[in-house]
Image (spheres, coloured by chain):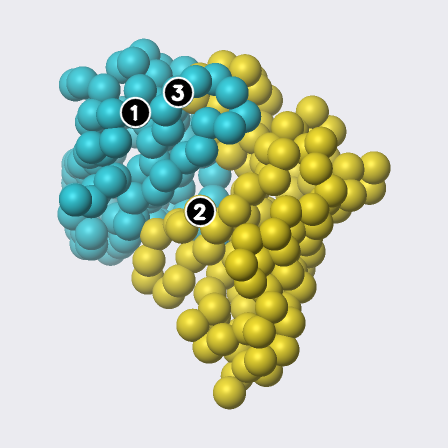
Chain colours: A yellow, B cyan
Amino acid sequence: GEDVEQSLFLSVREGDSSVINCTYTDSSSTYLYWYKQEPGAGLQLLTYIFSNMDMKQDQRLTVLLNKKDKHLSLRIADTQTGDSAIYFCAETGSNQGQAGTALIFGKGTTLSVSS
Amino acid sequence: DTAVSQTPKYLVTQMGNDKSIKCEQNLGHDTMYWYKQDSKKFLKIMFSYNNKELIINETVPNRFSPKSPDKAHLNLHINSLELGDSAVYFCASSLGTGLSTDTQYFGPGTRLTVL
C-alpha cells in the first residue's frame, strides 16, 4: 500500500538552511505536497510539485524531487524562528483521477529553530 | 472570510456521549473530507464526499457518521464516544476535479477530548 516516510525531528539555528526529507512508495503519484502545521493550528499548503519536474522554487522554499528514488525534499533558506512547525509530506492516494481522492501523509517532521 | 471553518474548535465530553462537529467551506468546492490526527500527529483520511455523495469511507467504526446536507457542509456525528476517539479532526475541501492538482484546503481543526 501507499506509504510516506519522514524523519521526525530537525533542529537548526536561525539563518541556516533547513532540509526536510521524505520518501514515498506510490510511483503513480503525479503531485506531491508539503503542508505546514504551526502549534495548535490547521494545515497550511506550502507548495507542491508535479512529478515530471525535478525542482520547484518559491521564494525561500526549494522542492527537489528524485522520482527514480521516490525521494522528495523541502529546503528552507535563511530559516527563521517563525518557521518552527511540523512539516508534512503528502502524496495522493489510490483512486487518482477520481474526485475525493485522499492525501496520504507522512508522520511529519518537527522543525525547531533556535536563535 | 474564512475558507474552511469548523465548529467547535474544542470539544470536551464524557465517554458514551454523542457529539457532532460541523464543517463549512465558502470556496465553492464540490469535494469535502474528514481527516483524523492522533496524539502522535499522524493524519489519516476518514471520509470524503463529492457533490454530497460518499466517495471514501476508510476503516472507521460505524459510530462515525458523516452527513452532507449540501456541497458546502460536511458534518461529522460520533455516537457512543470512546477514549480512543480523542484526537484532532480536520475538515478539508477541494474543487473535486479528480485531477492530482485537486489541492485540498484544511480547516483549523477540532480538538476532541473524551474523558
Q: Is residue B20 left or right of residue B44?
A: left
The amino acid at mark 2 is: Leu
The amino acid at mark 1 is: His
Percent coordinates x, y for residue A20 in the rendering: 65, 60
**Among the 4 quarters of the image, the one containing residue B107:** top left
Marking on residue B96: 3
Residue A8 or B19: which is nearer the viewer? A8
Whether pointer 1 and pointer 3 mark residues with C-beta atoms closer than 8 Å, the reply is yes
Which callout, 1 or 3, points at the residue further toward the start of the chain?
Answer: 1
Percent coordinates x, y for residue A76 in the rendering: 59, 64
Q: Which residue is mark 1?
A: B29
The amino acid at mark 3 is: Gly
| Position of the N terminus of chain A by quadrant | top right
> Which chain hosts label 2?
A
Q: Which residue is mark 2?
A: A45
Percent coordinates x, y for residue B100 in the rendering: 54, 25
Mark 1 and mark 2, same subunit?
no
Percent coordinates x, y for residue A67 in the rendering: 77, 37
Whether pointer 1 and pointer 2 mark residues with C-beta atoms closer than 8 Å, the reply is no
The residue depicted at 64 percent of the width and 72 percent of the height is: A17
